[in-house]
Image (tube, grey):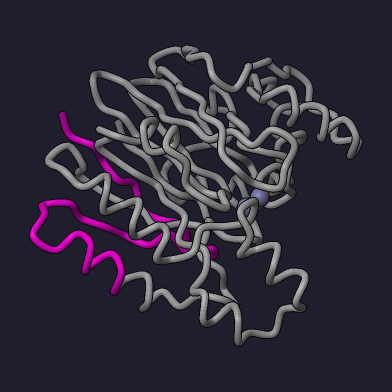
Amino acid sequence: MRFASLGSGSRGNALLVQSGRTRLLIDCGFGPRALAQRLARLGVVPEQIDAVLLTHEHSDHVAGVAALAKRFSCPVYASAGTRRALARRKIAVPCLEDIDGTTDFVVQDLQVRPYAVPHDAEQPTQFVVSANGLSLGVLTDAGSVTASMRDALRGCAGLMLEFNHDSAMLAQGPYPARLKARISGGLGHLENRVAADLLRAMRGDALQVVLAAHLSETNNDPHHVATCLSKVLADTSTVWQIATQQAGSDWIVLRA
Ligand SMILES: [Zn+2]
Ligand SMILES: [Zn+2]
């Protein structure tokens, strides 16, 4: 299995996961042209996407999904709450497939386990994707960490984990008070130290690689995130990268 971020942050998110001939996109926050350009960097064309999984309805995750699904008729898997929210916003996605947010399902070569997270969307759902005994856990857009989230992510070989903001930078930064409260609240985004604590609990021989994601360009500094990752993963064989808004990441391979 391999995966790559096409770009991550409040201006657009998409994660490509491949096993065998199956290519899944988790979220599609980029319009057709940007999506094609970002995929081309990884040697993929949009028509090779077999399905899209949506985590929630915020525009940085869904901005390009209707165009992609219309053009290539690929199925789009979303929770009932996400589907309702898309309908309210008049985002018409053809080929919507229902998921109930807790039951595993299969997309060709990949098994998908959805799990619920606290975030200010209608039914936010994150995913663990598995093939051939290897799992990639994905967690962005969560205001806090619950026991069931820890359970879902335990034992993964790869983790894409939100390091959204540094609490001091957010507090001293330019955002209005209400927005600061939203971001740092229980339904907002993961703070660096909260993400680091979760990662500390996930350390182990199984964990090959961590991709830090959804960093705020205003309220975070990649150097702070790098410091967190180096500290938590010192004395382990786990490697790490930071996904950027502009360039995402290269392909990251999980080895059996
Ligand atoms: Zn987001
Ligand atoms: Zn969100």
Q: State which quarter of the image contains the C terminus.
A: top left
Residue 25, x across and y down, in percent: 53, 34
Q: Is residue 168 left or right of residue 81?
A: left
Report the span colored magenta. 227-256
Q: Quadrant of the N terminus?
A: top left
Which residue occupies 45% across, 22% down?
Answer: 113
**111 lies left or right of 57:** left
Q: Position of residue 180 (x, y in %)?
A: 68, 72
* Residue found 72% across the figure and 79% down from its top: 175
Q: Is residue 92 left or right of residue 56?
A: right
Magenta stretch containing residue 255, yes or no? yes
- Along the line of sight, the residue nearer the viewer: 248 or 88: 88
Q: Which residue is at a point 63% across and 56% down the rendered structure image? A: 188
Q: How many marks?
A: 0
Q: Nearer the viewer, residue 254 or 47?
A: 254
Q: Is residue 81 above or below residue 240?
A: above
Whether 216 is among the magenta residues is no
Q: Where is residue 101? Give x, y as percent.
A: 59, 22
- Vertical comparison of 56 with 216: above or below: above
Considering only vertical position in the picture, is 20 above or below 126? above
Query: Depth check: 20 or 245 in front?
Result: 245
Residue 73 figure quarter:
top right
Q: Position of residue 145 (x, y in %)?
A: 47, 47
Q: Is residue 27 left or right of residue 20?
A: right
The structure residue drawn at horizontal position 38% and vertical position 20%, both measured from the top left corner, is 21
